[in-house]
Image (tube, coloured by chain):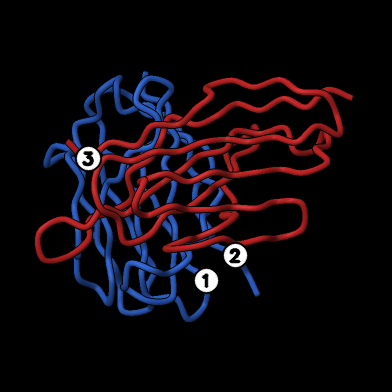
Amino acid sequence: KAGVTQTPRYLIKTRGQQVTLSCSPISGHRSVSWYQQTPGQGLQFLFEYFSETQRNKGNFPGRFSGRQFSNSRSEMNVSTLELGDSALYLCASSFRDTENTEAFFGQGTRLTVV
Amino acid sequence: KNEVEQSPQNLTAQEGEFITINCSYSVGISALHWLQQHPGGGIVSLFMLSSGKKKHGRLIATINIQEKHSSLHITASHPRDSAVYICAVRFQTGGGADGLTFGKGTHLIIQP
């Protein structure tokens, strides 16, 4: 069974540009959540989707957005990139939308903003 | 404020030692996760707990809901256990649960 796949793995963008990251969950999983990891702040929750609906959103500015498609694949978009957006972006998928369900993480996309 | 505290921040031990990593949280939760992250970034989910104790190989995780505390134990530690171990909880707020809140991680090094 294939794991969670994130593309691309590495990305370099310039300040002011926008970026789209992709996450393909494990087959059959309908819940996808996104996280940002930086050396200073550690791991922080961005948003969570289930069946194409955003269920929860973390404390990030509106420049960060996401969506989920009918096949459960998810994308997140960051507009007007800032240097501080440089981070490892991780997504995780799970089978159900309930609280007590194991999360499976992808390898992450490392975004560098220059 | 909903917070997750992990200790110790860094831990260096000799191969074969018994390792304990602690996690405490501020308010009620619906679930607690223990995660392992190796250099390069990939995260592996080790355990998800809402009560009691779980064991997988040399790893044991316990949670005390009343004390708001969880521990991750590694028995007969091995250099391949060297990684960052992260505690994450899903707080129960309002009518439902928010996304995961993470501890800052414990950087574990097991020396041969």
Depth order, front residue of A29/B62: B62
Q: Position of residue A80 (x, y in %)?
A: 19, 32
Q: Position of residue A113 (x, y in %)?
A: 36, 24
Q: Residues within 10 Å of mark 1 (few under 14, many from 20)?
A: many
The N terminus of chain B appears in which quarter of the rendering? Answer: top left
Residues at marks 1 and 2, common chain?
yes
Tell me whether the residue at label 1 lies in contact with that at label 2, contact meaning CB atoms closer than 8 angstroms. yes
Dot 1 falls on a residue whose secondary structure is: loop
Q: Residue furthest right?
A: B112
Dot 2 falls on a residue whose secondary structure is: loop
Depth order, front residue of A78/B62: B62
Q: Position of residue A66 (x, y in %)?
A: 24, 55
Q: Which mark is residue A3?
A: 2
Residue B92 lies in quadrant: bottom left
The subunit carrying tag 2 is A
For the residues labelled 2 and 3, the Cα–Cα distance comes to 31 Å
Quick one: label 1 or label 2, which is nearer the N terminus? 2
Residue displayed at 38% across by 78% down: A71
For the residues labelled 3 and 1, the Cα–Cα distance comes to 30 Å
Depth order, front residue of A30/A65: A30
Amino acid type assigned to the residue bearing label 2 in the image: Gly
Residues at marks 3 and 1, common chain?
no
Residue displayed at 76% across by 23% down: B13
Q: Position of residue B28 (x, y in %)?
A: 25, 53
Q: Colour of chain B?
A: red
Residues at marks 2 and 3, common chain?
no
Q: Give the labeled residue for mark 1.
A: A26
Residue displayed at 65% across by 37% down: B38
Q: Colour of chain A?
A: blue
Q: Which mark is residue B2?
A: 3
